[in-house]
Amino acid sequence: MTDPLSRPSDARQATSLPNDLNARELARWTWRQLTSMRTALVLLLLLALAAIPGSVFPQEDIDSLAVSQWRDNHPRLAPIWDRLDLFAVYGSPWFGAIYILLMISLVGCIIPRLFVYARALRAKPPRAPRHLSRLPESTSYTTDEDPDVVLARAASVVRDRRFRVEWTEGSDAVAAERGHLREAGNLVFHLAVIVVLVGVAIGSLFGYKGGVIMFNGEDYGFSNNLTQYDDFAPGSLFDPAVMEPFSFSITDFDVEWIPDGPRAGMARKFVAHLDYETEPGAETEEYDLRVNHPLSIGGTDVFLIGHGYAPVITVRDGEGNIAQSGPTVFLPTNAQTFESFGVVKAADAQPEQIGLEGSFYPTFSMGTDADGNLTMPGSAWGDALDPLVSLQVYTGDVGLDDGTSASVYVLDKTKATQLLKDDGQPFRMDLRPGDTVTLPDGLGSVTFEGLERWNKIQISRSPGKFIALGGVVAALLGLLASLFIRPRRLWVRARRQDDGSTLVEVARLDRSSGGDPETGRDELADIVAALRKDKS
Amino acid sequence: MTDAQWETLSNQGVAAAGVVYFLALLAYAVQWAALRDVPVKQLVGTDGAPVVEVPDVQVAHRTEMAGRLGLLLTGIGALAHFVALVGRGMAADPNRVPWGNMYEFTLAGTFVVVALFLATTNRWRLSWLGPIVVGFTLVVLLADVLWLYEPVAPLTEALESYWLVIHVVSAVIATGAFTLGAITSILYLLKARSTKETGYLARLPELAKLDRISYRMHAFGFPVWTFGVLISGPIWAHQAWSSYWNWDPKEVWAFITWVVYAAYLHARATAGWRGRNAAILALVGAATLWFNFIGINFFSTTSQHSYAEGAGEVSSLVVRVPGTVEAAEEVGVVVGPDHARA
Ligand code: HEM
């Protein structure tokens, strides 16, 4: 940069490594490199590059199921990917290294600039260069007014235009400057970037996010402590003591099914009606929990994020005792028709354990293909107009006795045998509400009592989110100032010439990065016009 | 008007816009054809554009008329385009914002490109950009109608949020501005390599001005993108999905776009990159922007923002079930299929 008027910050360029260096010089050199503009640029582009793999490969903390599928499909690559943290990109050391370096660079860059800025704020507009006509934006005219008159007017004209003005009577030029807020905006922007990262870090270290699937009804209430969650993802510094002691239950759930049109069958207007207490003993309050309308209790938010059907199935064993009863969560496998899949385990059944596995169809229909032949059974509709469960039966060890924490949504069939009909086909029963089917071989019976609903509730606490939000908003404001305020200097010099007339020179220097000759020229012309008009 | 009528109106609006844009393109073609063999005087006018010295008064008159006609037709096309957008929104029950799927987002995005061009063309003297903007819009609209068309449908639950409206409006506007910036950057690169004295490239404003226009488009788009992607997007995500940032592929790429454009502004402001390098960086930004819109929708299987699933076959807010589920039994719990956030 040859512009003598450029700010010191612009001079922060990378330098080459000194030849003979001791430790101190090396450290200084490293610091200069790290806080140089070029490094900041490279780090920014690296950050963009480093973010890519996380959008290509499934991520453990986002979709662990997809990760395990990927592992199964690529058994050879998976260990390498593990070593490279490609399943956890955004928490990986190398991703962290890039943004930490960027942060250091940022701090190293901002601090010196804060001092420079503080000095610049107090500084007077610099004196007029000797040859104003050499500046790219300059003009001149002659008049018969006295130079001091011209300069006094110039001072007031530019002051009215909100320039900071420096003119002492007797000197031959007025110096003016405006647009300091640009640099302030730029500093605010960069500082705010740090604030955002701090806010985000607080959230991910101290926050948590968990989910629970709940049946409707007072009997199935939830109270906010660790044991009640189905899945729970705490930050690494999370302390259970911060969990707010609220509790709630879902009294009712409404949903509306679109009857016709291109999205026929789509569900909408989900509302889970909650009764909640902010702490034990507090008054019960009501809230209609809807998508996009979470319930905030203290610093914790409660979201409705899913729903489904829970057929109430009773299993009686060979001795006539109830071995299992109550609603069972069936998980939708089709978002449109709510065809669902589920498992019932009756581990206490005598003489043998019983496991049921199968599908639930809210509106049962036999599908037809183009030729009108019956195809696979299915659900025509998400609403429960003609509900049916279709189950197959397993006996033997259905996986509850060995103490391993098997998923309640999966039947472990390794030690169970499927119940077959005489012809060797699997035994299958199709039940409508109220139906009971007696199992062969004196195993017992299964009754489909009725239908319940469940809701998936997500509960999260992200401390620091308002810090992060405040940070981005500040960053945006700073950015606007930084991009659209034009710092510029202006000088007016008036000198008596030999022939008695006064030569007035006006020059302007634009110091913004998006420097724009058109507005610059306009401003210069306006100011000159104002200077000359006032004369009359 | 009934919903069906609104929908018809919208389709007619798109067709009309297409025809009028095509006529505008013809008008521009007449304008530039007349000047095809006239060498550019190396004289730079006050606005930085080369002074068009046309020897023949009649030719001069004809080109000027053709240019004005082109601009007028572009304006009329934009009106029809706007009607098409409004029609989409009114045709849905309940009425909604016209950007519930890729077709609509593209319709809205191209409208913003034309509108931004019309809004700035006088102030920044961009008449030379007319043919490119109209040609680009025409091609994209055609592709939109051919490949992305979807009948009007109500918004899914997760999309019914005014934060979403704000979020998508800002994303569309920024996309329009970045696209104009990218077009200008491409013109810059082409002109920088061209040595011809006649023709379109030669008649473009000088390089420094192209560079400046490109910068301004980006300087306008960047804060809008910042607001859309880093403020309103997370606020909406927090309401709908319980965490404000999920590293979803769509978010990752929006972030990448943001970082690349930040690097672009940075490079210009501090490293003094102008012209060629800056233009290339701007195009990298545009590539990430468009990849996010097109690529992620079609290729990503994990994005919660996916637009591109077959009509109705929407999955979102999928709750993966903890535990060992066999691959074929991947289960989802669904509240509201959601597609937005292009
Ligand atoms: C998180 C990383 C960073 C981001 C997202 C970022 C973003 C930006 C943006 C968008 C601008 C343009 C605003 C304008 O044109 O005035 C800018 C300007 C600037 N940045 Fe950064 N920056 C980052 C890191 C840094 C670092 C590490 C340094 C110092 C080494 C730095 C120094 C500067 C300077 C000096 C300017 C302004 C120049 C001017 O006033 O024209 N930035 N930055």
Image (spheres, rainbow, N blue to C red):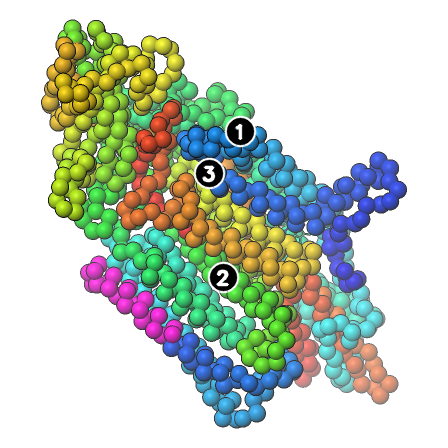
Left/right placement of residue A17 relative to residue A81 reads: right
Please give the residue where the numbered disc 1 appears in the rendered image: A79
Residue B38 appears in the picture as rendered: yes
How far apart are the alpha carbons under marks 2 and 1?
A: 41 Å
Tell me which numbered mark, 3 or 2, is placed earlier along the sequence. 2
Residue hosting label 3: B246
Residue under pointer 2: B179
Q: Which residues are magenta?
A: B1-22
Q: Nearer the viewer, residue A271 or B277?
A: B277
Number of the label disc, if any, that sits on residue A131: none
Q: Secondary structure at mark 1?
A: helix
Dominant secondary-structure state across the stretch colored magenta: helix
Chain containing mark 1: A
| Type of amino acid under label 3 | Asn
Instruction: Determine the chain carrying the residue at label 3.
Output: B
Q: Residue at x 76, y 41 (%)?
A: A31
Q: The disc numbered 2 marks a residue on which chain? A: B
Q: Position of residue A396 (x, y in %)?
A: 26, 11
Between the residue at mark 3 and the residue at mark 2, the CA separation in whole angstroms equals 27 Å
